Image: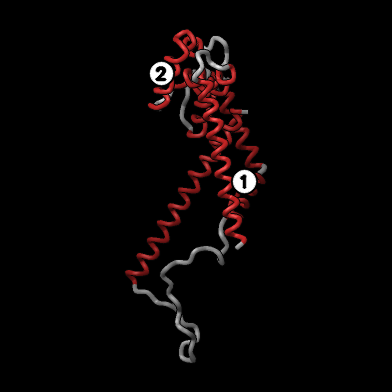
Amino acid sequence: MSINRLRLVQQKETAIAKQQRRSLLLARIGLLDQRECDPGLEEAVKTIIYTAPRTEIKELQQVRDALIHKFSKEFAKDAIENESNVVPDKVMKRLSSAPPSNELVSLYLKEIARAYSVPFSELSDNDNEDESRDDNDEDDNPSGGEKEKERRLSNLPSPETAPKSPIAVMAPNPTTDNPSPSVKLDSNTSAKVNSEISKAKQSNSKAKKDEQELDALRKRFEALRK
């Protein structure tokens, strides 16, 4: 009973919120019917006019055309050029197509060249010495790598919670004739199992190496951003 009553109260609150939203929209639509744009809606209207050509939303373009037809071309020109600085700075930054600076691009390329040992014209000898010095410091103080290893091991599931294999081979129960039983496989099956185990180890080692290289590259990029 209590669950049903709570659901009923929630439905009533949702209906009231929708009704209030409709009333607010109707009131604002009435403001748009005026000949001059209301100051409270000027920012929203000019933002739509400014952003619509920079998006691929067909409906937003239609709304923009209707607003331009409603509030004259001079109003639209002011919104497109943002002469009155009404369009929010956040929108301007998101829609900006300015390329990154040459210094930032050069830093990114240097870090990529260091990570993959690729020759790069802007990578000087001093940069290489700094890189080798950092590597030596990491070798002298391997605590960071040990902590990272412990963190990754702690994220692994425990044997109790780890998913079990759908196929399980149980050894026979011990008897007086065979006190220590074991599962014996033929030579072909044993060779296949050993091959699969070696492949799995190789793939795991390769994935671990790639992950370490990616982590190192991410750390360098984070250092560049700072």
**Residue 91, image x, y percentages:** 53, 23
**Residue 54, image x, y percentages:** 43, 21
Q: In front: 39, or 223? A: 39
136 shown above or below 168: above
Amino acid type assigned to the residue bearing label 1 in the image: Gly
Look at 51% across and 40% down and name the residue there: 213
Q: In front: 180, or 164? A: 164
- Dividing the image into 4 quarters, which one contains the N terminus? bottom right
Neighbourhood count class around disc 2 (C-alpha, 10 Å): few under 14, some 14–19, many 20 upward: some
Mark 1 vs 2, N-terminal side? 2
Question: Can see residue 123?
Answer: no
**Residue 2, image x, y percentages:** 62, 61
Neighbourhood count class around disc 1 (C-alpha, 10 Å): few under 14, some 14–19, many 20 upward: few
Label placed on residue 65: 2
20 shown above or below 93: below
Task: Name the secondary structure under disc 2.
Answer: helix
Look at 52% across and 29% down and name the residue there: 26
Task: Name the secondary structure under disc 1.
Answer: helix
User: Residue placed farthest to the left in the image?
Assistant: 188
Residue at label 1? 145
Q: In front: 159, or 131? A: 159
Question: Can see residue 86?
Answer: yes
User: Residue placed farthest to the bottom in the image?
Assistant: 176
Mark in the foreground, 1 or 2:
2
Give the colouring mode of the picture.
secondary structure
Look at 42% across and 74% down and name the residue there: 169
**Residue 172, image x, y percentages:** 45, 82
* Mark 1 to mark 2 CA distance (whole Å): 59 Å
- Dividing the image into 4 quarters, which one contains the C terminus? top right
Amino acid type assigned to the residue bearing label 2 in the image: Asp
